[in-house]
């Protein structure tokens, strides 16, 4: 039976591990797996008898899953944060579903504004965090990631937006790539579709991929089951200024979450790294070969399809001059089940073109780990990690609902590098989005966490869409000097 399961399940994805679910869950998981095979339209495999598959997994599965939560370090963090819930008057009183954050100057302003996309309201809102003045830049459907850029090369910065096309995950062709084009006069933005008829678009990045002097747009089409992939929108804008983008399909798999851009092999052409979830659960390097062609090189793959990839950042984490990969896994919204494998990790760059490649380092076990970003929070010259978690309140196994799972942590970098864990917020995890910036211009990095409680429902989830954690390191140091 084991070999039959390996041939059937392993043809599409890594074979599920029995320890991924408790014994009483496996009948449902096997049923879902068989449904997905039927939905795929394939008929070239011989499914083993479903009752025998259920019996195989139940025999080997644990009675219950054991979860390890992040523990606060005995060494105190050498700085403190003041938490503030941030809302604005124009926002409808609905459960927030913040899906994108940026921090950039707007036309006619000499200060950066927070730019926030909210799936629940469909709005792209700019917020001056100091004056609390806000303005709606655009009303879309279900906007996700926001990419500030000068797309037309005229010195005016607008925003390329990933439009999901639906609140919940489903197959459709309502996804879009939107250009919020700044008007020549005033502070208004015009909504211009760059691509339509797509699946759920989760990420957009802008770079000159064909090295012809104008910016192209890379698109992560997360999709669902039958839709999805990665596209490159080649910029072929006319000399008269008529925007025109030609799509090139680079990958056909659904499930791509993030596609940050880097020149990983230092050949002068922008590459990108993709975090692909669903049945692949993989980190892959797309090497730019020129002429809109890319070679996909796998860098790392999760143990099975319950890994729950959720976010990826490119950063020189160890300060040795090359690009490392920081990523999280904690997505449990497909079946509401968290997994003990959830957490934070990084891939150390030891030479991507050698057999040594990238070395995997596990940093933290953490149910619902969703986003991780880096910055020198304590001013000691190295990069610390800020990470957040997001879990449904109805998460299973049910014992997780009674645990004190932190929503925000800091991993303080020490020599080695090693990392000390500090729990910053112990409220229920509702933060899929993070941003680090010096919001008060006092010389240190503050933290903005975007709240998404729109999948939980209920009046109790109508909370402030943002939590700002004001870094008081500089103010504390200044007070000490004054004394």
Image (cartoon, rainbow, N blue to C red):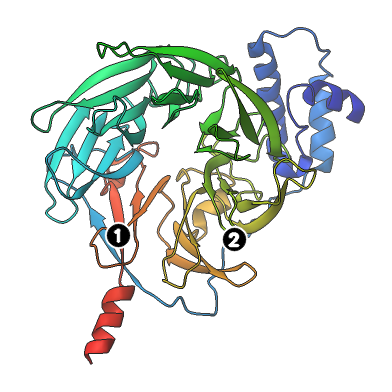
406 or 353: which is nearer to us?
A: 353
Q: Identify which residue is drawn at 45% across, 46% down.
A: 393
Q: Identify which residue is drawn at 13% across, 39% down.
A: 90
The answer to whether residue 133 is seen in the rendering is: yes
The residue tagged 2 is 318
The answer to whether residue 1 is seen in the rendering is: no
The residue tagged 1 is 438
Q: Which residue is outermost to the left? A: 186
State the image coordinates of residue 330 (x, y, percent, origin top left): 56, 45
Residue 482 is drawn in which quadrant?
A: bottom left
Disc 1, SS: loop
State the image coordinates of residue 470 (x, y, percent, origin top left): 29, 64
Looking at the rendered structure, the number of numbered marks drawn on it comes to 2
Q: Is residue 451 left or right of residue 318?
A: left
Q: Is residue 211 left or right of residue 225?
A: left
Disc 2, SS: loop
Residue 432 is drawn in which quadrant?
A: top left
Give the quarter of the figure containing the N terminus.
top right
Q: Identify which residue is drawn at 46% across, 73% down.
A: 380
Q: Of marks 1 and 2, which one's residue comes earlier in the chain?
A: 2
Give the crowd class for mark 1: few <14, some 14-19, many >=20 residues within 10 Å: some
Whether residue 216 is situated above or below residue 247 in the rendered picture: below
Whether residue 9 is situated above or below residue 45 in the rendered picture: below
Give the quarter of the figure containing the C terminus.
bottom left
Q: Is residue 282 left or right of residue 211?
A: right
State the image coordinates of residue 190 (x, y, percent, origin top left): 19, 22
Between the residue at mark 1 and the residue at mark 2, the CA separation in whole angstroms equals 22 Å
Q: Identify which residue is drawn at 34% across, 47% down.
A: 450
State the image coordinates of residue 417 (x, y, percent, origin top left): 62, 67
């Amino acid at each position: 039976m084991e070999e039959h399961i390996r041939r059937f399940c392993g043809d599409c994805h890594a074979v599920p591990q029995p320890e991924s679910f408790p014994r009483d869950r496996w009948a449902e998981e096997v049923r879902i797996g068989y449904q997905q095979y039927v939905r795929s339209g394939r008929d070239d495999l011989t499914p083993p008898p479903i009752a025998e598959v259920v019996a195989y997994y139940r025999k080997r599965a644990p009675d219950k899953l054991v979860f390890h939560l992040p523990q606060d370090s005995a060494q105190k963090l050498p700085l403190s944060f003041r938490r503030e819930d941030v809302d604005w008057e124009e926002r409808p009183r609905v459960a927030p579903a913040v899906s994108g954050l940026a921090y950039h100057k707007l036309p006619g302003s000499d200060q950066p504004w927070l730019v926030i996309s909210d799936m629940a309201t469909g709005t792209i809102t700019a917020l001056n965090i100091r004056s609390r003045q806000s303005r709606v830049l655009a009303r879309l459907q279900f906007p996700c990631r926001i990419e500030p850029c000068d797309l037309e090369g005229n010195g005016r910065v607008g925003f390329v937006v990933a439009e999901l096309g639906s609140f919940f995950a489903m197959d459709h062709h309502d996804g879009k790539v939107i250009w919020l084009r700044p008007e020549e006069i005033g502070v208004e933005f015009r909504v211009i579709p760059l691509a339509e008829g797509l699946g759920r678009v989760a990420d957009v990045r802008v770079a000159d991929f064909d090295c012809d002097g104008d910016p192209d747009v890379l698109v992560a089409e997360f999709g669902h089951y039958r839709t999805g992939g990665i596209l490159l929108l080649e910029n072929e804008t006319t000399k008269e200024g008529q925007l025109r983008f030609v799509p090139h399909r680079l990958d056909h798999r659904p499930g791509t979450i993030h596609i940050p851009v880097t020149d990983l092999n230092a050949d002068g052409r922008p590459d990108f790294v993709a975090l692909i979830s669903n049945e692949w659960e993989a980190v892959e390097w797309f090497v730019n070969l020129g002429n809109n062609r890319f070679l996909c090189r796998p860098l790392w793959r999760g143990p099975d399809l319950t890994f729950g990839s959720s976010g990826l950042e490119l950063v020189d984490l160890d300060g040795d001059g090359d690009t490392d990969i920081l990523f999280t896994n904690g997505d449990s919204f497909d079946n509401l089940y968290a997994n003990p494998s959830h957490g934070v990790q990084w891939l150390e760059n030891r030479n991507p073109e050698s057999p040594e490649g990238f070395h995997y380092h596990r940093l933290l076990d953490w149910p619902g780990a969703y986003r991780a970003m880096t910055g020198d929070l304590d001013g000691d010259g190295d990069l610390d990690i800020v990470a957040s978690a997001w879990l449904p309140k109805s998460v299973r196994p049910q014992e997780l609902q009674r645990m004190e799972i932190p929503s925000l942590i800091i991993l303080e970098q020490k020599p080695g590098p090693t990392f000390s864990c500090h729990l910053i917020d112990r409220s229920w995890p509702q933060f899929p989005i993070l941003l680090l910036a010096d919001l008060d211009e006092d010389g240190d990095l503050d933290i903005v966490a975007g709240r998404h409680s729109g999948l939980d429902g209920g009046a109790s989830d109508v909370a402030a869409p943002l939590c700002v954690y004001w870094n008081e390191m500089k103010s504390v140091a200044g007070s000490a000097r004054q004394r």
